[in-house]
Amino acid sequence: MAPILARFEPATLIPASSTALVILARTPALGEVKTRLANEIGAPAALVAYEELLEITLTQAHRWIELHPANFAALQLTSLDSSNPWLISAQARFPKLQFNHQCEGELGERMVGAFRLALEHADQAMIVGSDCPLLGPRIYADAANALNDHDVVISPTEDGGFALLGLKNLPAAEATGMFTRPRWSTSTTFEDTLNCAISQGLQVRVLPKLWDIDTALEWNQWRELEASGQLPEHW
């Protein structure tokens, strides 16, 4: 299925040398987010956890834009209901972020759609989700800088996936099969994606490994870390 492209509606002209950050996320709704976590702690608690993680992701993206105003960030959601209280509140709290409808299709198709749209307005782009609260302005800056002399930048996670994927040439990336061949949401997703890129001669920068939150154990680890105040230096 070909992705259905949404459109950015930037309030100001985006400089050609900018970096785009796109957050792919589900619109918060009971029973429709963090399903693995919900199996352990229940759907209401999982929704609370998801909204907190999404809030952290948006806050860090907003901080990155404030620090690097030549760049821009967009949140692409599965639905944009103008009457949704969460959406109304989020748009008011994060005025520097674009809010758009996410492409339809499998994850790889949605990523291609997000990259294609972002690269219409920027020389390079990065995609993240909302499962990794360790992402922040320093990692975003490191990833953007890595794309100056690499074709692809990727931040792996401990469960075998990745928290960030960045590139500047979408056709070259698509030709590797990195959006169709990886086994998504498995312990080999990062390895599959990396191998696709390397097999076609793309220069890849691998960032330090992070961890994301899918289970009750990981959620509790994050809450303990947050409560201790011992957040990573890069955060």
Image: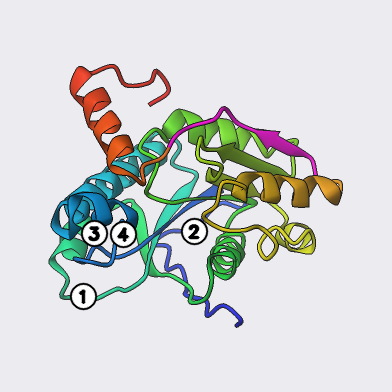
Q: Please rate how many residues cluster around mark 4, counting C-alpha atoms within 10 Å: few if below 14, some from 14 to 19, many from 20.
A: some
Range drawn in magenta = 202-211
Which mark's residue is nearer the viewer, 4 or 2? 4
* Residue appearing at x 56%, y 30% in the figure: 142
- How far apart are the two marked residues, 4 and 2, measured between alpha carbons? 39 Å
Q: In the picture, which quadrant includes the C terminus?
A: top left
Residue 67 coordinates in the image, percent (x, y) = 40, 33
Residue depicted at x 23% and y 18%: 229
Give the residue type at disc 2: Leu
Numbered tag placed on residue 82 in the rendering: 1
Mark sitting on residue 35: 4
Which residue occupies 52% across, 80% down? 4
Most foreground residue, 12 or 198: 198
Marks 3 and 2, how far apart in space? 20 Å
- Residue type at tag 3: Gln
Mark 4 and mark 2 residues within 8 Å of each other at the beta carbon: no
Q: What separation in Å lies between label 3 and label 1 (alpha carbons)?
A: 10 Å
In this view, the mark in front (4 or 3): 4
**x, y (%) of residue 136?**
41, 34
Answer with mark 4 or mark 1, whichever residue precedes in sequence. Answer: 4
- Residue located beneath label 2 in the image: 13
- Checking the image for residue 147, the label placed there is none
